[in-house]
Each structure stands twice: as structure tokens, then as C-alpha cells.
Image (spheres, helix red, strand yellow):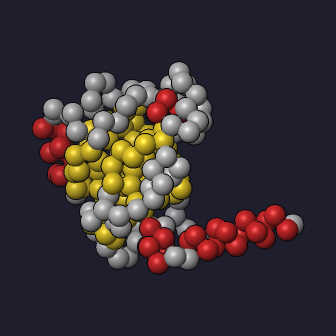
């Protein structure tokens, strides 16, 4: 019972910080891992207020699902995501103007990001204050899953959100 109380206090203290309170409304809602550089991550702001990312929040990647191999893919500092809107990070090597246009036409804001990798990399919205040891806030992938676990190769994953109480 004591461990549960300590964990609850730890989680509560993290979530009660000023930037964290609004950050809880930001969720990874789509992950696209296609051939070549056709890769993207969509973030959605489900809050009632716009959110501007502070310097310590970004997208981090665990290469090949290998334990301890985290690196910052994109620092989101200064990027604003409007209330109820999406932000789509597109691989910087994507040559497709159609991909970028589709993001914009569907109300998203495209951000050209670092190289995403392949289907066994884990991606997370994270506190990147310590880049090699990020605090994971939302994750897509199998953390510490190991090389060769192609959980997300040539696939589009969309988070299904349930409504109600």
C-alpha cells in the first residue's frame, strides 16, 4: 500500500507542474511508417487552450527498441498547437509535396522533423531535459522491445479515443 501512495505522490507532483498541466491535453494520435521516408507523427491538442511547447518537451526516439538508446528527434520548443487542432511532424527527407499538402488541407500544421527510422523504433512525446533519459509522456511502440521487433513497419496507427465519463 505504501508503494502505491509514493507512486501516486510522484505522479501527482509531476503532473501538477505548470507546463505539465496543459501538456496532459497533448496526445500522439497517429503514427505513419511507410516505405522510404514516408513517415509522420501526429499530435493533437484536446484542450480548450492553445499550447506552446517549452524547451524541455520534444519527440524522442529509442533506436531499434534497444534499452538505453534514446535520442531527441525533435525539440518542439516554441511550436504552438492550437486548441482542438493537430500538429504533424513529417520526416525531413520526405520528398512528397502531396504528403505535406494533405496535412495542411486536413487542418494540421506540418513540421519538418528529423529522420524517423524504421518499424522497430519507439517514438515518444517526452520531457527531454536529459536527452539520453527522457521522461516519457506518451509513447508509440514497444519500449525496450529489442531490435528486429517490427511492430510498426509499413503501417498507420490511429489512436481510438473514447468519449464519455
Which residue reaches farthest left? 97
Horizontal side of 149 relative to 26 (left or right) equals: right
Give x and y (percent) for residue 110: 22, 51
Give x and y (percent) for residue 136: 53, 53
Q: Residue at x 31, y 69 (%)?
A: 52
Give x and y (percent) for residue 83: 32, 71
Q: Is residue 163 above or below residue 29?
A: below
Q: Nearer the viewer, residue 120 or 97?
A: 120
Q: Residue at x 37, y 31 (%)?
A: 117
Q: Quadrant of residue 78?
A: bottom left
Q: Quadrant of residue 145?
A: top right
Q: Is residue 72 above or below residue 118?
A: below
Q: Is residue 23 above or below residue 92?
A: below
Horizontal side of 105 relative to 156 (left or right) equals: left
Horizontal side of 86 relative to 156 (left or right) equals: left
Horizontal side of 117 relative to 159 (left or right) equals: left
- Residue 94 visible at all: yes
Which residue reaches farthest right? 1
Amino acid at each position: 500500500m505504501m508503494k502505491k501512495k509514493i507512486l501516486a505522490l510522484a505522479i501527482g507532483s509531476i503532473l501538477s507542474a505548470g507546463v505539465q498541466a496543459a501538456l496532459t491535453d497533448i496526445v500522439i494520435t497517429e503514427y505513419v511508417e511507410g516505405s522510404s521516408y514516408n513517415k509522420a507523427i501526429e499530435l493533437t491538442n484536446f484542450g480548450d487552450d492553445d499550447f506552446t511547447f517549452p524547451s524541455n518537451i520534444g519527440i524522442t526516439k529509442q533506436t531499434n527498441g534497444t534499452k538505453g538508446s534514446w535520442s531527441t528527434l525533435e525539440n518542439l520548443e516554441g511550436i504552438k498547437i492550437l486548441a482542438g487542432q493537430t500538429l504533424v511532424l513529417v520526416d525531413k527527407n520526405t520528398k512528397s509535396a502531396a504528403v505535406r499538402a494533405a496535412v495542411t488541407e486536413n487542418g494540421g500544421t506540418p513540421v519538418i522533423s528529423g529522420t524517423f527510422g524504421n518499424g522497430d523504433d519507439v517514438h515518444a512525446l517526452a520531457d527531454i531535459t536529459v536527452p539520453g533519459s527522457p521522461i516519457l509522456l506518451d509513447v508509440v511502440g514497444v519500449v525496450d522491445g529489442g531490435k528486429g521487433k517490427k511492430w510498426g513497419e509499413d503501417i498507420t496507427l490511429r489512436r481510438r479515443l473514447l468519449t464519455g465519463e
